[in-house]
Image (tube, rainbow, N blue to C red):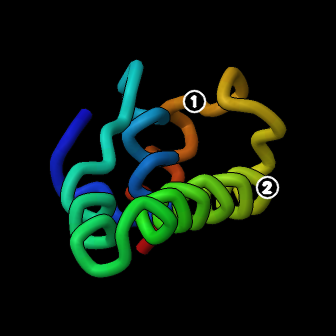
Amino acid sequence: MDGGVRTGTDVLTALALGADAVLLGRPVLWALAAGGAEAAQACVAEVVSDLAHVMALAGAASIAEVSGDLVHAAVARP
């Protein structure tokens, strides 16, 4: 999946919907333009950290445990 991915929640949602990969295009390019390679690495590290956080909140210890149930539960809430 590529497009509109900015946070770990976006990555988790894409994976839960069946994505095999998630690309971070613009955020990394913006960071690269603003602060060079170190800023781009920090951007990716921040998204990875955020993904680990939202996975923990969702009760998924690994990517293999991410399933479509996570998305359906969120959509079904009023």
Residue 74 in the image, given as x and y percentages of width and height: 48, 59
Q: Which residue is pictured at 72% across the width and 63% down the height?
A: 53
| Left or right placement of residue 39 versus residue 61 in this view | left
Closer to the camera in the image, 1 or 39: 39
Q: Residue at x 55, y 37 (%)?
A: 69
The residue pinned by badge 1 equals 67
Residue 52 % position (x, y): 71, 54
- Give the amino acid type for the residue marked by disc 1 in the picture: Ser
In three-dimensional space, the C-alpha distance between marks 1 and 2, rounded to whole angstroms, equals: 14 Å
Query: Residue shown at 71%/28% (left/top)?
Result: 65
Q: In this view of the protein, can residue 78 be seen by the observer?
A: yes
Residue 59 is left or right of residue 75, and the answer is right
In the displayed structure, 26 sits above or below 3; it is below
Viewport quadrant of the N terminus: top left
In this rendering, position of residue 32 left or right of residue 69: left
Labels 1, 2: front one: 2
**42 and 56: which one is in front?**
42
Q: Which SS class for mark 1?
A: loop
**Amino acid type of the residue that numbered disc 2 sits on in the rendered structure:** Ala
Mark found first going from the N terminus, 1 or 2: 2
Q: Which mark is residue 56?
A: 2
Residue at figure coordinates x 79%, y 55% from the top left:
56
Q: Whole-percent x and y of residue 49?
A: 67, 61
Dot 1 crowding, Cα within 10 Å, few <14, some 14–19, many 20+: some
Residue 74 in sight from this viewpoint: no
Residue 2 in the image, given as x and y percentages of width and height: 21, 40
